[in-house]
Image (tube, grey):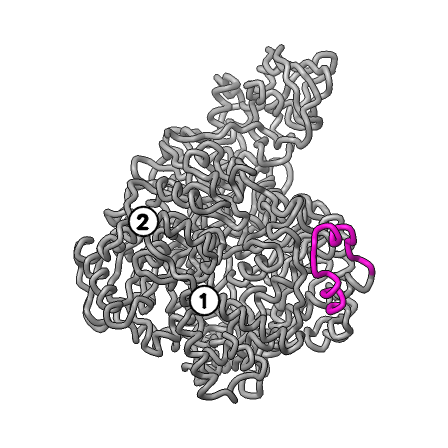
Amino acid sequence: MGLLKEHDFGTPAKPGPATVTVEIDGVPVTVPEGTSIMRAAAETGTDVPKLCATDSLEAFGSCRLCLVEIDGKKGTPASCTTPVAEGMKVRTQTPKLEKLRQGVMELYISDHPLDCLTCAANGDCELQDMSGVVGLRQVRYGYEGENHLDAPKDTSNPYFDFDASKCIVCSRCVRACGEVQGTFALTIEGRGFDSKVSPGAAELFMDSECVSCGACVQACPTATLQEKSVVDLGMPTRTVLTTCAYCGVGCSFKAELRGDELVRMVPYKDGGANEGHSCVKGRFAFGYATHPDRKLNPMIREKITDEWREVDWETAISYVAEKFRDIQARHGAGSIGGITSSRCTNEEVYVVQKMVRAAFGNNNVDTCARVCHSPTGYGLKQTFGTSAGTQDFRSVAQADVIVVIGANPTDGHPVFASRMKRRLREGAKLIVIDPRRIDLVRSPYIEAEHHLQLAPGTNVAIVNAMAHVVVTEGLVDRSFVADRCEEFDEWAAFIAREENSPEATESITGVPAEQVRAAARLYGGAGNGAIYYGLGVTEHSQGSTMVMGMANLAMATGNIGREGVGVNPLRGQNNVQGSCDMGSFPHELSGYRHVSDDAVREVFEKLWERPILPEPGLRIPNMFDAAVDGTFLGLFVQGEDIAQSDPNTQHVNAALSAMELVVVQDLFLNETAKFAHVFLPGTSFLEKDGTFTNAERRINRVRPVMAPKTGKDEWRVACEIAQAMGYAMNYEHPREIMAEIAAVTPTFAGVSFEKLDKLGSVQWPCNDKAPEGTPTMHVDAFVRGKGRFVQTPFVATRERSTRKYPLILTTGRILSQYNVGAQTRRTANVAWHPEDVLEIHPHDAEVRGIENGDEVTLSSRVGTTTLRALIADRMPVGVVYTTFHHPVTGANVVTTENSDWATNCPEYKVTAVQVGLKHAVDRHDAARDEEPALAD
Amino acid sequence: MTSTISPQVRMANDIAVQFRHLPVDEAAKAIANHIRMFWDPRMKSELRRLVDEDPTSFDPVALTAAKQV
C-alpha cells in the first residue's frame, strides 16, 4: 500500500450507544452523548480545521482554529471542547469562520520559519496543511517582530530532535506525555509569549524524565519533534502494517518505508494491543535488523575451536541432517532435540516442533518459555484449565483494584503500563507486591495504596496470607465459588489455618501483618480486582505454586470471567504465548494437549503420517543434564541465546561443549554460537511473514517489510532439514502452516491469514463458538469446567543467605534493553544502558565501602562476575538487583540450578550472593560533565 | 560448577516437599503422577536406577513415589 494515514477524528470516541442526533453543515449524524462537535463532524466526513486537537488526546481548546457556528447560539465556540446536543445545527464553514481562522493562522505563521521546502516534515505537517485549508494568502504582521526563530535545537535524544523554533505551543506533546504515556516529563514553561515546551526544568531531553516512547513526536503537528531518521532519509512513501518483535504486549506498527528502506515505525491506532501507543524499543530500536554484525550466510565448522566457514544453504542443511542422523544412529532417536524461539512467528515455531516430533522422532522440544512463564502454563492449567491470561489489555480500564505482583510494567511492558497508569489516575487503587520499590509505587499522579515489600522467595506466603484474610474475614464470593468452582472447602480449611495468617507469615515475608490484611481487604472488597504478574512470580522454586495461589485468590473473590478482573501474566517476549500455544513444550502438542492423550496424538499422526511418542521429551535443563551425562548430543536452537540467558552458565557451557552438534539459528553470532558447529542465519521480524500471539492471546499479523536478507524464509529452514532427514514438510506459504495449525488445534480452528487481514487480529480461542475470538476467558464456565482450588503450602527455597553469601540477588530487565540485549545492544538504546549495573541499598554499600560507580565483584556458590554498583534506596536492605542484557557481565554466571518444582523454570529471582569492592571508580572522571548536546 | 546431587534426586525431592501437606499415600501418588506426566523416559529410568542404588538420597515420600513410577 501507499503511505497509510489514519483519519484523525480530533477528539477521542465516547463510549456508549449513539443517541444524540445533530446536523453538521446540513448532514445529520447520530453519536454517543459527550461526543465533541469536531468528532461528530469528522464522522460525517467534514474535518474541521484544527491544530491542538488530535483524537488520541482529550480536547484542549487552545488553538482557536476549530471554531464553528451553532444555530441559535452566540459566538463561535471551539468544536473540540463543545459537546453535541440533541437537535444542534452546526456550520463549520462560513465567511465569518473563514476570516477568524485566517487571522489565527496569520499569527502562527508570523512566528514560524518559512522553510517548508527544506523542512523534514514537508508533506507531513499539519501547520502546512491548515495554512492551505484556511486559505492563508498573506501575513499582515510581517516576520520581523519578536519571534522564537532563534530558539535552540535539542538533539540530545538519539532518535528525535526537538526544534523549538518550529513549535506552536499547542501542548499536544505535553498532553501526550501525560495522558497517553503517563510520564509527565514535559511541561509548558513560562507564560504568554515566553511559553515554551520544556522537558522538565529546562533540561535536555536526554537529561529529563523522558522515556522516549515517541508519543510526543507522534502528537506533534509540525517538525518541532521529528524523528532523526526522517531528517536523514526523507518522508516515507509507503506503509506495511506489522507487529513489534520486542515484549509480549505485541504492539501493532506501521512500518513506513521509502522505497525498500525502513524510515520509521509508527504505532498503529487500530492496533488492538496498543491503540496507537509505543515504547522506545518498538518505536525506535529497529536498527539491529540491518546492523553490520548480522550474519547472512550459513556457516559450519567441525570443531568449536575451528574458524567458521561460509557455505551455501544446501550444504549447511545437508550437513545438519547428516550429522543429526549419524548421532541418532549411534545413540538412539532421543539423543537429539530442539529449542523453539519466542521471538519467531507461530508458523516458524510450529515447523520446528513438527521437525522434532516427526522428523527427529522424539518429543525433545522445548522453548525459552521454560525459563520464564512455564509455571504460568502449569498453574493456570491446573486451576482454570488452560495456559493463558484471562483478559484483554483493555480490561484494565474497568479494574477498581489492580494488584501488580513480581512485575515492573513501566520497564518490561511499557505500553500496557501506560494503560494501567491511566486507569490508576482515574482512581483505581494499586497494590504492588515486590521486593523493590518499582516506579509504579510512586510516580506522577500515582501512589500505591500498599507496597508489600516482601523478602525474595516468599511470594506464596504472601498470597496465602491474603487468601487467609479473604476466607476468615468473610470476603469470599460465595455464589461464584458455589456455582463455578470445586474443591473449595478443602482449600478454605487449609488456607484458614493459623500458619497462613498474616501474623504467622510476617516473620517469613518481612511484611507487617496489618499491611497484608489491609491489602487483602482492599482486593477482596473490590468491585473488580485484577491481578497482573511477571517473572517475579514464576522464576522461583515455587513459581507454579504461586500462580495457583493467585488463581485461588481470584476465584475466591469472584474476580474471574468478566472485564476488569482476572489473572494476567505479562509475558516477556513477543511470541512467548504463541510459542507455547504451538506445542513447543515436550509434554504437550499444540493447544496444550498432553502427548499421552491417544485421541490428540491420533489427529497429528494421521496428518503427519508419523507416530508420536506418548511420553514427554526433555525440557531444556534436562537436555543440559543429559548432555553432561552423554545421552543427548545434538541440539537445534532457534533464536535463543541459552548460553547467556539460562542459569548456571558453567553448567550450560559444560552441556553445550559435550554435544557433537549444536546448530544455532539466529541473527547474530551470540554466546551460544560459541559452542555451535553450524550457524544458520535467521530473519528479523522485518523479513518475516506470519503471526505473533501476545500476552492477551491476540494473534497479530507480522508482514514482511523487506525480503529475507539471508535469501531464505526462516520457516523453510526447518522444513528443509526435515526433508533432508527423510521426512517431507512441504508448504508454499506460511498461510498454509497456519491452516495446518488451525486444523489440528481446536482453539485456533477459526484462525486464518485471511481472517486476520480482515479483522486486524483475533484472540484465541477462535473457532465456531467464537468466530471473532475471545477477549475475556472463563465467562460462563472455566475451560476445565469448574475452576479448581489447589492447596498451596509455602515451602521456603533451599537458597538461603549465609554468612558467606549474606545478600539475595534478584534479576530483571530495564526499559531500554530487551532480554539478552542481542537486539537492543545493537541500537542507540545503549545510550541509556551501556552496561548492566548492580543496584544495592545504601546501607549494604556503605558497610562494604562501595560508592556509586565502583566496580564490584558479585559472587555466589556457583560463580563470580564483575559489574558496577548503583546505589539505590529502592532496594531493600539485604537484596541486590541486576539485569542480564550484556554478555560481558554474565549475570547468569552466579545464578544456580534451583528451579520451580513443577516445570524446572529457573529460580533467577533468588540467589545468595556476596558483593565486594573490586576497584573504586575514578571519582574525578565520574564527576566530569559531558558536553551538552545543544546545536544551533 | 555442576551440582553433585543427581538431578533426578534433586527434582524428585523438590516435588515431594510440595506435597507434604497431603497424607503419604496421596502425596506419593501425586508425585508419581507428576513425574509420569512431565519427565522424559530416560529420566524415569535413571530415577528407578537411583532408587535401587542410593535410596537414602531420597526424601521418604519421594522414594515411595519413585517406586511407583
From this viewpoint, is residue A189 visible? no
| In the image, residue A492 lies in the stretch drawn in magenta | yes
- Give coordinates of residue A235: x percent, y percent: 37, 34
Q: In the rendering, at what x and y percent does residue A748 appear?
A: 47, 44
Look at mark 2 in the image and give the residue it sits on. Answer: A715
Q: Secondary structure beneath disc 2? A: helix
Residue type at tag 2? Trp
Q: Nearer the viewer, residue B41 or A900?
A: B41
Identity of the residue drawn at 63% across and 36% down: A192
Q: Which residues are magenta?
A: A474-495
In terms of depth relative to the viewer, which is nearer, A778 or A934? A778
Specify the label residue A884 is tagged with.
1
Instruction: Report the amino acid beneath label 1.
Output: Phe
Nearer to me, A593 or A296: A593
Q: Is residue A340 above or below residue A847?
A: above
Counting from the top left corner in percent of width and height, residue B54 is at 47, 88
Label 2: few (<14), some or many (≥20) within 10 Å? many
